[in-house]
Image (tube, rainbow, N blue to C red):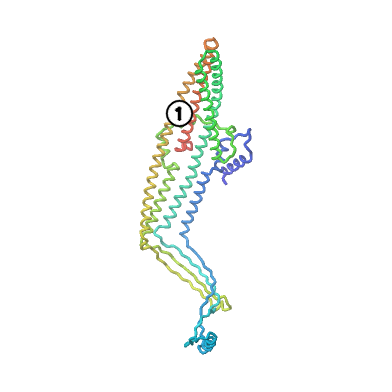
Amino acid sequence: MTGKKAMLVLSFMALLAAPLAAQDTVTYEDLSNALSFNNTTLLAAMEDYRTAGIDVKDAKSSYHPQISYTVAGSYVYQHQPMFIDNSDINPLIDTVSQIFGRPLPHLNEPLELTKWLSVNAPYLNASVSLVQPIYTWGKVTSSVKMYEEIESARALQIGDTEAQLDAQLKAYLSSLYYLDQVLVLLDSIQQDADELVTIAEQSSSTGVLLQQDVASARVSASQIALSKTQVESQIQNITTALETMTGIENLDQTVIDYTPDEAWFAEIANADRAQLELMATGNSQASIQMLDHMAAAAGYAQNAAKGSMYVVPDIALSVSADYTAPLTDRFADESAWGVTVAVALQGTIWDGGQRSNDRQRAESAVSSAQITRTEAVNTIKTTLNENLGNIDIALANIEYQKANIELLQSELELEQSRFDLGASSRQDILEKRIELGQAQVEMITQKMSLAASCFTVDYLTGYSSL
């Protein structure tokens, strides 16, 4: 076990040994290590790779001789005729005739009966056969290479799945971080909105405000409460998703210690876009390499199908040894053995067109693999450009909200000064504070969108692994 794997095991065991109490903290590394051991998608990818390795061994076994044996015991029975003379049976017939009072016909020939007799002793029969392929027109080699390509694709699938899950994990953790901030802001906004409702109700009772103004204040407060409920539901959904991903039960989001690297988000946003596209669609990308391996596997399957066409014979060496002996005291004297060595040709003349169909099917698989690769590249480009566009939009919104927040803060300070001078009301200050809080919530929401898109771009391009 390598040092890195040993550390992973120790970290995971420590995570399991210590229950997640209120004072404990769970880091990104803890969650990532747990994911490596428990995530079912990743474990399934590992099993696919293990199965692919077994398929390679099965294919390579065709290089080796196939040896089989048979051991059997036999006991041979055969029938032997037995004759009864008619002179012995006719007097008996006369006696029976007298008993029944009617004549019965006599036998003119002897009566033949059959009896089963053991005429052979038990025998021991043993045989060993060996078949060694000599020349198969490349079918065995093509089959081995096909499964090796599939095995390589499955190995890459493990790394690609890890990278995809890691990007998803970071996106979830970033969302939790920002949603916590949103929830704090909404709590503050809720307090201001409730105070506005109280002021509106008091003003309505004195005739200063209309009942419609009270209803409007209550609706605004209800909208804030609804937003809080939605955010809390999002937090719960993300926490449940993290539990599923990592296998950690009863995960409390309040103990998760993770802070997004906003400087890294800016680095991703400012990276050369053409270079990012080359990184996402180049041959160094795991997803592209997997498709190339699968296309190569389809090519080797096509070669195997060509080597299986009609009349083309496979050549093999066949060696068999047989031994027979009775299980009696004549064992040594009556035993027999023999060895047969043969070179055999085996081929198919006609099977209703199945081999021809297999060849056409293999050709179609090669074309489909090429089409799949092209479609995948186009999908990667589209997804990359969509997320880069989302990054630009999120950054633009963040800059706008920053400017808006600065303006609202200055307006709030001015409103507070006017209130101190008696030229404004508490209601005006609360409305301005709510407006400022909503702008701050919108900016944080845009940061959450920015984080998700940056992690997606990182997964598509492998940017952070450079």
Is residue 41 or residue 270 the one in the foreground?
A: 41
| Residue on which the image places disc 1 | 394
The image quarter in which residue 283 lies: top left
SS label for mark 1: helix
Query: In front: 439, or 89?
Result: 89
Report the number of discs.
1
Which amino acid lies under the numbered mark 1 shown in the image of this protein?
Answer: Ala
Identify the image quadrant of residue 385: top left
Q: Residue 401: x percent and y percent?
A: 47, 23
Judge whether 157 appears above or below 217 on screen. below
Disc 1 crowd, CA 10 A, few/some/many (<14, 14-19, 20+): many
Task: Decide which of 443, 185 is in the foreground and name it.
Answer: 185
- Give the x, y percent position of residue 59: 46, 56
Which residue is at a point 42% across and 56% down the rendered structure image?
A: 141
Q: Residue furthest front?
A: 101
Is 421 placed above or below 48 here?
above
Percent across and percent down for residue 351 are 37, 61
Would you place residue 117 above or below residue 58 in this image?
Answer: below
313 sits left or right of 189 in the view = left
Residue 361 place in picture, x, y as percent: 37, 53
